[in-house]
Image (tube, helix red, strand yellow):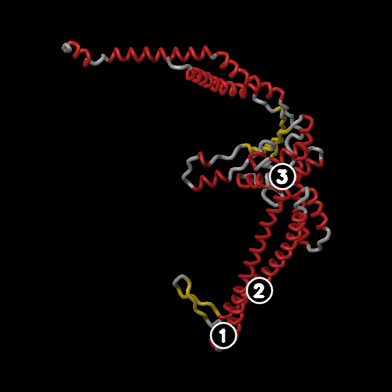
Amino acid sequence: MASPQNNTAKTCPIPVSTQEEADAREDEINLIDYFRVLWKRRHLILLGSVLPPLFAGFILFFWPTDYKVTYTYDVNNQGGYDMASWNPDEKNYNMLLDQFYSEENIDRIVNKLRENGLDKYARLINRAKGKKDLEKFIDFEVLPPYADLSKLQITQAAQLEEIRRLKALLLNMTIRGRPANSISKISSVIRENFENVVPVYLIEEQLNAVMRGHKADMASIEENEFNLELTLKTNKSALEKMKSVKVEASEKSGGGVMLQFDVGGQNEYLPLGYQIQAREFKIIELEESIETDKARYDYLKNLLGLDGKLSAELKNNASSFYTIQQFNAFLAGLVDRYENKELKDYLSSLVKKVENRISASVPITERPKIYAVSKGTVKKSAIVFVISLMISIFAAFLCEGSQKSQIPAS
């Protein structure tokens, strides 16, 4: 029979302090076991964590160096927004990038690179998928940068519109490539495209917008023509009836028939002769308006035909490396072929604008310095070391566990 003292000992709980000390000793034993495993597998961990970063650093050290050159343009000095320049706000900047990175324009650059014996770089450009990949070779940056609207807490529409109208002052175009002796040839091809070819297709887009405006104005004139003709007919009919009114002799001595009309709630009177004169003046104004609208309609029609000829010239050369200088020569040739003074003035004005655009497309520094692009050998090797160390430690414990599982239980 068990004694009461033994029963009490079995049911008596272990003190909390004693339990915590036991847990602490167990954790200490586990940590010691971990350190033993690490020490035992130190050679695996050392080799596994050191060799990969050394190998990566070796590859990066002997990997060919990329070079970059940056051209800076004063985009705030391009003569305003017309068919020969682009307004350096965010919307038009994005349109410029879309045009430059378009598949059609990249194909032009690739073909030109191949013509200049730069097949390797042409292949790299051609393999790029989308704007993000192309930015690794050709990147743009505006100064000051446009505000990121997603990070701004703007509640008023006026403030939002004002921010959207902010304009850049400078535009940087950075070109990356290798080897060092080829970067100059590469940059010259890309510069020629950006400075001389892309503006042509911006002109084409703006020219199409101008033509749509001409058509809208012509439609407005046509719509207003009926109202003017009807008003003119009404006034002529009223004038004839006024002239047929018979005036008594007594009334003539008194200044003629007095026509009553209301002005501001008061009755006013106008002699018939004055009323006839006013109607005649009104008819003259209507006839002048009709003639003016006809002349403007004819001018817009001729202008639309001329702009259509300019647009056809651009579309016919869309697939080639057609430059703004070639387009300017085409414009200058057209000036002498037109006898209409208005169209000659329009063409002459456009020639001057294109010439201003050509002179403004030159970078601030014609021959900027070429820099070697940092490979980030130390940073990348450190990242490889951290990853390799973690993998080596995991492999050490995995090997230890595998070894223990193969030992038969006693």
Mark with earlier residue (2, 1): 1
Q: Position of residue 376 (x, y in %)?
A: 64, 25
Q: Amino acid at mark 2?
A: Glu
In the displayed structure image, the side of residue 108 where residue 274 appears, left or right: left
Q: Residue at x 81, y 42 (%)?
A: 115
Among the 4 quarters of the image, the one containing residue 46: top right
Name the front one of labels 3 and 1.
3
Q: How many marks?
A: 3
Q: Nearer the viewer, residue 127 or 96?
A: 127
Instruction: Please determine whether, in this image, residue 277 is positioned above or below residue 244.
Output: above
Mark 1, secondary structure of its residue:
helix
The residue at which mark 1 appears reads as 252
In the displayed structure image, the side of residue 282 where residue 351 appears, left or right: right
The residue at which mark 2 appears reads as 287
Q: Position of residue 239 (x, y in %)?
A: 60, 81
Among the 4 quarters of the image, the one containing residue 296: bottom right
Mark with earlier residue (3, 1): 3
Instruction: Please determine whether, in this image, residue 143 is positioned above or below residue 395.
Output: below
The residue at which mark 3 appears reads as 106
In this rendering, does residue 191 appear at all? yes
Q: Position of residue 68 (x, y in %)?
A: 71, 31
Mark with earlier residue (3, 2): 3
Q: Callout 3: 10 Å neighbours few (<14), some, many (20+)?
A: many
The N terminus lies in quadrant: top left
Instruction: Kindly indicate whether the residue at mark 2 contacts the one at mark 3 (C-beta within 8 angstroms).
Output: no
Q: CA distance from mark 3 to mark 2?
A: 56 Å
Mark 3, secondary structure of its residue:
helix
In this rendering, does residue 170 appear at all? no
